[in-house]
């Protein structure tokens, strides 16, 4: 029987586990925090470990040239931020510090949540390094609701108030379904954010949508925020707030690849909830999104 005595922790794509980011172009971090979409949807705090395990099914060599993704980027796995489940203020501080350390090393954080609340402290860390950010936010929901406090629905409301983002350069993409608060899409627009509904994505097509987004944020540092519920539940059942009518797996991965040429300064993939997943489908798809985003960073795709 093979010995496991000297095995280290499970890491994303088998990358080295270290908190020394010198020489790394990208760093994978887990953010195992959720404050709960509702009492029945707790579980995305388990997302990072599930995504790491699922990544073992992915290959890392480019199919048409001699190039290994992990080696090319010097990718490392920095482990998990030391969050405390459901305790927002200390967890946000821990996330901001963990992501800030990656930025300080001139590397790009690629993170796995956690629910959509983990985005706000990451935006704080990114804006501290780069100034107000352009954001491409792929989600069934705006997360820009007119509520008080910190939760999954107010991430971008607070980000706008704190001046972390450039309002005209924040795009919510994939919106669909009914909402728990009336008129929330218009509220996002009133904050200066741009919206593309799922119906508009379907009408325009994936390639045209990607072209529109590239033109809108070209020349700016771009924060790529990918909520897994932008996918249809048939492709990603294990999410915090599933909404039918979303992207297929093929469409979503093509949309990520279509962002080639942008200055991606952070990648945030959230809301994978293993207790609600089926056969690890969502975790594997989330790992695949992260892998495609890393290929963006590596320059593997030619801009259209």
Image (spheres, rainbow, N blue to C red):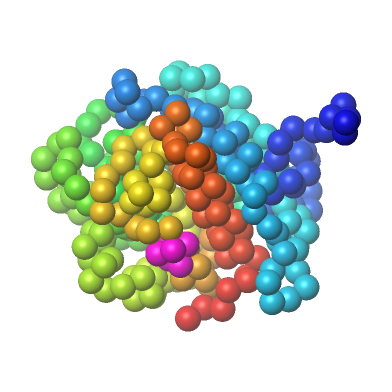
The answer to whether 78 appears left or right of 219 in the picture is: right
Residue at the spot 45% in from the left edge and 38% down from the top edge: 278
Residue 211's quadrant in the figure? bottom left
User: Would you say the magenta stretch is mainly helix, strand or loop?
Assistant: helix
Q: Considering depth in this image, is 194 or 300 the residue closer to the camera? A: 300
Residue 208 pos. (x, y %)? 34, 76
Residue 45 screen position, x and y as percent: 49, 28
Q: Quadrant of the N terminus?
A: top right
* Residue 19 versus residue 294 in the image, above or below: above
As drawn, the residue found furthest toward the bottom would be 304
What segment is highlighted magenta in the picture? 250-255
Which residue is at the far front? 1
Residue 92 seen in render: no
Residue 222 at x, y percent in the picture: 48, 59
Q: Is residue 241 left or right of residue 228?
A: left
Q: Is residue 116 above or below residue 40?
A: below
- Does residue 1 belong to the magenta stretch? no
């Amino acid at each position: 029987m093979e010995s496991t005595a000297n095995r280290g922790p499970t890491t994303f794509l088998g990358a080295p586990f270290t908190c020394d980011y010198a020489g790394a172009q990208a760093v994978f971090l887990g953010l195992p925090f959720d404050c709960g979409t509702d009492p029945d949807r707790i579980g995305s705090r388990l997302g990072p470990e599930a995504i790491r395990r699922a990544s073992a099914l992915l290959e890392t060599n480019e199919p048409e040239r001699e190039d290994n993704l992990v080696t090319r980027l010097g990718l490392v796995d920095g482990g998990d931020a030391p969050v405390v489940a459901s305790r927002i203020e200390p967890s946000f501080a821990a996330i901001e510090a963990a992501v800030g350390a990656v930025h300080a090393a001139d590397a790009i954080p690629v993170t796995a949540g956690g629910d959509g609340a983990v985005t706000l402290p990451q935006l704080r860390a990114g804006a501290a390094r780069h100034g107000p950010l352009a954001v491409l936010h792929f989600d069934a929901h705006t997360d820009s609701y007119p509520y008080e406090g910190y939760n999954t629905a107010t991430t971008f409301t607070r980000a706008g108030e704190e001046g972390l983002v450039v309002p005209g350069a924040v795009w919510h993409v994939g919106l669909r379904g009914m909402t728990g608060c009336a008129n929330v899409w218009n509220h996002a627009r009133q904050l200066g954010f741009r919206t593309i509904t799922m119906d508009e994505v379907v009408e325009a097509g994936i390639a045209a949508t990607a072209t529109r987004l590239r033109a809108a944020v070209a020349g700016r540092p771009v924060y790529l925020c990918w909520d897994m519920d932008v996918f249809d539940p048939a492709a990603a059942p294990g999410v915090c707030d599933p909404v039918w009518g979303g992207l297929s797996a093929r469409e979503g991965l093509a949309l990520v690849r279509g962002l080639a040429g942008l200055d991606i300064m952070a990648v945030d993939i959230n809301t994978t909830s293993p207790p609600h997943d089926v056969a690890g489908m969502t975790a594997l798809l989330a790992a695949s999104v992260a892998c495609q985003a890393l290929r963006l960073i590596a320059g593997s795709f030619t801009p259209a």
